[in-house]
C-alpha cells in the first residue's frame, strides 16, 4: 500500500499534495498497490472530502489539536503512530519546507530509508528507482532505497502535474484514526507566519524581466543589467545569492523563497538554473538564457540561449535593441 | 555558549562534472573543492553568537583527508577547534551514515547549540541536520534566517536554568515565522542569514596552532539508499541556441524576440 501525506494549513490544502498524489498513482500503476491519503491537522474534514474525489482506496484523517500549528515534534509523534497502524510500503510527501522540517526526523525515528527531492519514478518489473537531481542539477541520479519498508520519498514541487490526477467514479471513503499526542512534549513554540516588509515591487505583474545571477560577478556590474532592462522596458530581478549579498533588495528575488513570476520575457543573465530558482520563473512565456556554461541547467527551460560571456553579449544586445 | 558547526566540503561551482568508471559517483581527482555555501553562513552565525554570548565554536567535518582544507579555513575564520571524522567512504555516504559520523563525536561534548547548513550543494539531501537532531534527542528548526538567544540562554546548562532560543524560520514565497525552543537545540541555517567574513592573515596564522581532533566514524552506520546510476540531465525543452560573434548573436536574438516570440 502507498500512503500519501497531505499538507494543509487552516483547512486549506497545499496544491503540491495533488502532484504527489499523481506520483503515487503512477507508482501504484506499476505495482498495482492501493493508494491511501493521510491528512494530519486539527480540523481537516473539508480537505479530506476534497481529496476523496481522487481515485484512491481511502482518506485517513489524523485529527488532534496538538497538530495545529505545525511543529516537527508534534508531527513526528503523531505520524509515527499513524504509519505504524496503516503499515504502508511507501510514504510519499511533497518536498515542501514543512516536509523538509519533519520527514527526515520521522524516517530516522522509524529507522527507514528516505529519498528526497525526487523528480521521477522508474520501474522495471518489481524494481523501482527514484530519480533525483544532485550537484545543483548538474547531474541526475537513480536511487534505490534500502532496508525494511516503509520507504519515505519526497517529490520535488512540479515533478508531476496536479491536473493529471485520476478521479474516482464516486468519493473514496474517509476514516478517522485517532492517535494520542502529548502536547507538553512539543518543544517548538511557533508564532504566526508573517511577511517581511510590504513588497514595493510586484514582479508578478511585470511583462519583461531581466534577471541577474552570480555570473554578474560584482555589485558594480548590476548597472549593466539595469541598462539592458531599461532598453527593454523590463524590471530587474535576481537569483538568491545576489539578494543575499545585498546587491539587490530581497523583494527582487525570484524563486521558491522569493517571488513567482510569469512575464512574457524572462532574460536570465549568468544564472545556473537551480530548481529553487526555476520554480519561480518556469511559467514565463519566453525564457532567454545567457550563460558561459553550455551545460547549465537553465538551458533546459530556455527557449533561446546564447552560450558565452555576458559581459560581451549584454552590451551587444543593448546596441541591437536600440538600433 | 558551546556551539558546534557541521561543515561539508563540496565541489566548487565552476567544476564540470565527470563520472567515475561505474557511473555511480564523480571522478573526484578532477574536482576542486570548497566549503558548502550554507555551512559558511552557519559558521559565521556561530562566530557572531560567540562574540555576543561568549563560549566556544567547534567545527566538525566528516569526509576523506581532503576535507582538512575546509576545516583549516573554518579555523582561520575564527573557529576555536575542530573534529575531523575521517574515512574515504564518507565522500559519498548517504545522509544516515553521514549523520552518524559527527553524531558519535558530538554525543560526549554536550553542545548547547549545533548549527548545520540547510542543504549540501553536492548530494543535496536536506536531511543530515534533522537526522542528527533526532539521533541526539535535540529540538530542531530548519531554514533559519535569524537566531536570538533569550537572556540566560547562554548560561552553562549545568548550573543555570535551561536556555531558550528564538529563531526566524523561512517559509515559502517570502513568509517567515518565529519559533521558540529550549536549548540544547539544532538549527539548519539558510544562506543569506548574515554577511560572511573572510579569513585574515592573522586568522590563518592563528589557525595553525588550533586543535584538529581526527577520529574514525563509528562502525555501526547502515546505508539506507544506493545510487545505481549517475548521468547528465536529459534535456527537456528544445532550446534554440544562437551562435556567432557577440554582435551577431545579439542581433539575431533581438530579431527573434521581435519577430518570432513578439515579446519586445
Ligand atoms: C531552501 C532553498 C531555497 C532557495 N530559494 C531560492 C530562491 O528563491 N531563488 C534562487 O534564485 N535561489 C534559491 N536558492 C538557491 C539555489 O539553490 C541556488 O544556489 C541559486 O539559485 C544559484 O544562484 P545563481 O544561479 O545566481 O548562481 P550559480 O549557481 O553560482 O550560477 C552562476 C552561473 O553564472 C554563469 N556565469 C559565470 N560567469 C559568467 C559570465 N561571465 N557570463 C555568463 N555566465 C556566467 C555560470 O556558468 C553559472 O551557471 C534556494 C536554495 C534552497 C536550499
Ligand atoms: N560530511 C559532512 N560533514 C559535516 N557536515 C555535513 C556533512 N554532510 C552534511 N553535513 C551538514 O548537513 C547539512 C545538510 O546536508 P545534506 O543533508 O547533505 O543536504 C550540510 O549543510 C552540512 O552542514
Image (tube, coloured by chain):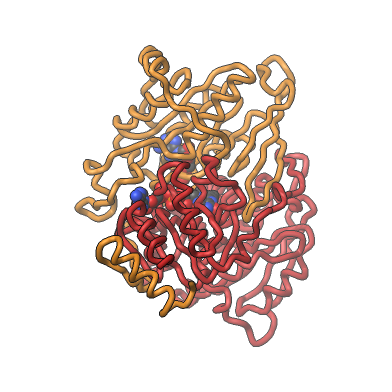
Chain colours: A red, B orange
**Residue A71 percent coordinates (x, y):** 69, 47
The answer to whether residue A101 shows anywhere in this view is yes
Residue A161 versus residue B263: which sits nearer the camera? B263
Quarter of the image that includes the C terminus of chain A: bottom left
Q: Residue at x 75, y 51 (%)?
A: A69
- Total marks placed: 0
- Examine the rendered structure and indicate whether residue A49 appears above or below residue A182: below
- Residue B224: tell me if it is visible: no
Q: Is residue A146 above or below residue B63?
A: below
Indicate the quadrant where residue A59 lies: bottom right
User: Is A294 above or below relative to A108?
Assistant: below
Q: Is residue A204 left or right of residue A112?
A: right
x and y percentages locating residue B116 in the rendered image: 51, 36
Residue in the image at 54% along x and 24% along y: B47
Looking at the image, in which quadrant does ligand 2 appear?
top left
Q: Residue furthest left?
A: B21
Rendered residue at 61%/82% (across/down): A167
Residue at point 39%, 70% (across, down): B254
Point out residue B62 in the picture as x, y percentages from the top left corner.
Answer: 39, 33
Amino acid at each position: 500500500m502507498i500512503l500519501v501525506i497531505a499538507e494543509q494549513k487552516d483547512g486549506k490544502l497545499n496544491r503540491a499534495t495533488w502532484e504527489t498524489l499523481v506520483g503515487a498513482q503512477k507508482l501504484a500503476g506499476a505495482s498495482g498497490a492501493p493508494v491511501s491519503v493521510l491528512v494530519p491537522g486539527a480540523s481537516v474534514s473539508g480537505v479530506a472530502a476534497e481529496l476523496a474525489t481522487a481515485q484512491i482506496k481511502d482518506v485517513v484523517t489524523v485529527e488532534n489539536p496538538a497538530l495545529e500549528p505545525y511543529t516537527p515534534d508534534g508531527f513526528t509523534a503523531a505520524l509515527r503512530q499513524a504509519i505504524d497502524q496503516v503499515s504502508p510500503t511507501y510514504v510519499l510527501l511533497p518536498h515542501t519546507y514543512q516536509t523538509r522540517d519533519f520527514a527526515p526526523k520521522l524516517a530516522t525515528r522509524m529507522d527507514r530509508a528516505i529519498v528526497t527531492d525526487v523528480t521521477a519514478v522508474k520501474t522495471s518489473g518489481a524494481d523501482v528507482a527514484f530519480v533525483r537531481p544532485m550537484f545543483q542539477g548538474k547531474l541526475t541520479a537513480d536511487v534505490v532505497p534500502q532496508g525494511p519498508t516503509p520507504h519515505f520519498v519526497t517529490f520535488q514541487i512540479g515533478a508531476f502535474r496536479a491536473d493529471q490526477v485520476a478521479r474516482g467514479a464516486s468519493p473514496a471513503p474517509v476514516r478517522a484514526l485517532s492517535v494520542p499526542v502529548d502536547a507538553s512534549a512539543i518543544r517548538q513554540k511557533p508564532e504566526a507566519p508573517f511577511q517581511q516588509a510590504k513588497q514595493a515591487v510586484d514582479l508578478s505583474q511585470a511583462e519583461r524581466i531581466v534577471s541577474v545571477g552570480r555570473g554578474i560577478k560584482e555589485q558594480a556590474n548590476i548597472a549593466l543589467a539595469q541598462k539592458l532592462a531599461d532598453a527593454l522596458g523590463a524590471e530587474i530581478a535576481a537569483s538568491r545569492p545576489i539578494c543575499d549579498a545585498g546587491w539587490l533588495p530581497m523583494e527582487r528575488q525570484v524563486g521558491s523563497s522569493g517571488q513567482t513570476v510569469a512575464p512574457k520575457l524572462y532574460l536570465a543573465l549568468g544564472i545556473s538554473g537551480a530548481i529553487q530558482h526555476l520554480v519561480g520563473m518556469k511559467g514565463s512565456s519566453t525564457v532567454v538564457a545567457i550563460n558561459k556554461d553550455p551545460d547549465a541547467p537553465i538551458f533546459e527551460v530556455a527557449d533561446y540561449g546564447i552560450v558565452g560571456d555576458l559581459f560581451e553579449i549584454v552590451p551587444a544586445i543593448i546596441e541591437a535593441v536600440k538600433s | 555558549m558551546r556551539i558546534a558547526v557541521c561543515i561539508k566540503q563540496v565541489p566548487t561551482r565552476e567544476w564540470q562534472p565527470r563520472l567515475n568508471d561505474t557511473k555511480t559517483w564523480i571522478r573526484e581527482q578532477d574536482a576542486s573543492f570548497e566549503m558548502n555555501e550554507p555551512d559558511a553562513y552557519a559558521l559565521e552565525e556561530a562566530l557572531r553568537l560567540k562574540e555576543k554570548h561568549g563560549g566556544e565554536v567547534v567545527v566538525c567535518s566528516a569526509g576523506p583527508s581532503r576535507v582538512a582544507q575546509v576545516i583549516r579555513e573554518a579555523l582561520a575564520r575564527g573557529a576555536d577547534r575542530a573534529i575531523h571524522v575521517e574515512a574515504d567512504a564518507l565522500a559519498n555516504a548517504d545522509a544516515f551514515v553521514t549523520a552518524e559520523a559527527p553524531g558519535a563525536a558530538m554525543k560526549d561534548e554536550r553542545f548547547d547549540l549545533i548549527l548545520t547548513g540547510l542543504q549540501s550543494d553536492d548530494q543535496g539531501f536536506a536531511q543530515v541536520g534533522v537526522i542528527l537532531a533526532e539521533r541526539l534527542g535535540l529540538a530542531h528548526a530548519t531554514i533559519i534566517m535569524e537566531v536570538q538567544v533569550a537572556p540566560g540562554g547562554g548560561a552553562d546548562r549545568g548550573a543555570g536554568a535551561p536556555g531558550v532560543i528564538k529563531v526566524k524560520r523561512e517559509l515559502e514565497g517570502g513568509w517567515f515565522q518565529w519559533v521558540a525552543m529550549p536549548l540544547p537545540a539544532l538549527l539548519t541555517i539558510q544562506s543569506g542569514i548574515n554577511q560572511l567574513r573572510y579569513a585574515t592573515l592573522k586568522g590563518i596564522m592563528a589557525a595553525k596552532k588550533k586543535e584538529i581532533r581526527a577520529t574514525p566514524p563509528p562502525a555501526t552506520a547502515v546505508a539506507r539508499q544506493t545510487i545505481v546510476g549517475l548521468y547528465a540531465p536529459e534535456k527537456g525543452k528544445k532550446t534554440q541556441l544562437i551562435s556567432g560573434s557577440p554582435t551577431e548573436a545579439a542581433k539575431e536574438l533581438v530579431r527573434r524576440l521581435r519577430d518570432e516570440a513578439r515579446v519586445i
